[in-house]
Image (cartoon, rainbow, N blue to C red):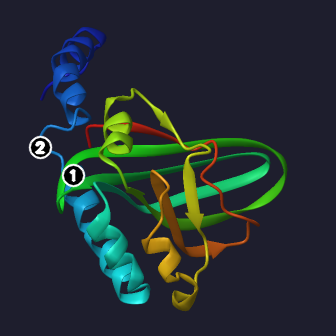
């Protein structure tokens, strides 16, 4: 029978540390396939329920698909989600979206959104940045009723069009302002 003492425990812990450290580095993880599967499901839902977005996708230089962003707040709040950047229908990078807020708020909600990069320049700026924040150059489409995504959306001259859909929860309003997107290795 083996007797466990401090020395045996310490040596075992030190030997196991590199193995434990390797668990969270993304190598061999199923994070990327899970994000891709969720992005595929999100796009299928978007195209089925909002058919005009297919035209928008056809004109876009690239799309950031955020399948699920969760926000919660009680005076101070925050949100987080992970998604895939698609160019030509292929995932080229993965991103996280984080958001913080302070103000009169209480509740929680979840939503999906897709950022359509309508110009190569907008897509290039997004990809080159170390952390891209949603701002004034985005045109928002909020309505969760398919008929409200009208043809004007597909002829947009904005460099980035954000389609927000699938809202669920009890937190008033959805905005991407203040949302920061950062490239990740899932």
SS at badge 2: loop
**The label number, if any, that marks residue 32 in the structure image:** 1
In the image: residue 70, left or right of residue 172: left
- Residue occupying image coordinates x 73% and y 65%: 173
Viewer-nearest of labels 1 and 2? Answer: 1
39, 74: nearer the viewer: 39
Q: In the image, is residue 66 above or below residue 170?
A: above
Please provide percent x and percent y for residue 159: 45, 50
72, 64: nearer the viewer: 64
Any part of residue 134 in sight: yes
Residues packed near mark 1 inside 10 Å, few (<14), some (14 to 19) or many (20 plus)? some
Residue farthest to the bottom, as pictured = 147
Which quadrant is the C terminus positioned in? top left
134, 15: nearer the viewer: 134
Please provide percent x and percent y for residue 54: 32, 78
Please provide percent x and percent y for residue 156: 48, 65
Residues packed near mark 2 inside 10 Å, few (<14), some (14 to 19) or many (20 plus)? few
Any part of residue 38 in sight: no
- Residue occupying image coordinates x 40% and y 82%: 52
Please provide percent x and percent y for residue 9: 26, 18
SS at badge 1: helix
Q: In the image, is residue 124 above or below residue 10?
A: below
Give the labeled residue for mark 2: 28
């Amino acid at each position: 029978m083996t007797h466990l003492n401090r020395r045996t425990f310490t040596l075992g812990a030190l030997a196991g540390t590199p193995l434990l450290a390797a668990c969270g580095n993304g190598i061999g993880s199923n994070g990327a396939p899970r994000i891709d599967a969720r992005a595929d499901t999100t796009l299928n839902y978007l195209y089925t329920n909002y058919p005009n977005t297919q035209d928008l996708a056809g004109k876009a230089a690239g799309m950031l698909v955020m399948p699920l962003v969760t926000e919660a707040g009680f005076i101070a709040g925050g949100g987080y989600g992970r998604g895939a950047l698609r160019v030509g229908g292929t995932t080229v990078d993965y991103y996280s979206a984080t958001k913080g807020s302070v103000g009169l708020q209480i509740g929680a909600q979840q939503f999906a959104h897709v950022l359509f990069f309508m110009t190569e320049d907008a897509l290039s700026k997004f990809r080159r940045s170390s952390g891209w924040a949603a701002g004034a150059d985005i045109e928002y489409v909020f309505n969760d009723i398919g008929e409200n995504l009208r043809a004007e959306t597909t002829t947009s001259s904005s460099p980035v069009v954000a389609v927000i859909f699938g809202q669920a929860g009890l937190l008033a309003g959805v905005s991407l302002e203040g949302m920061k997107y950062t490239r990740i290795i899932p």
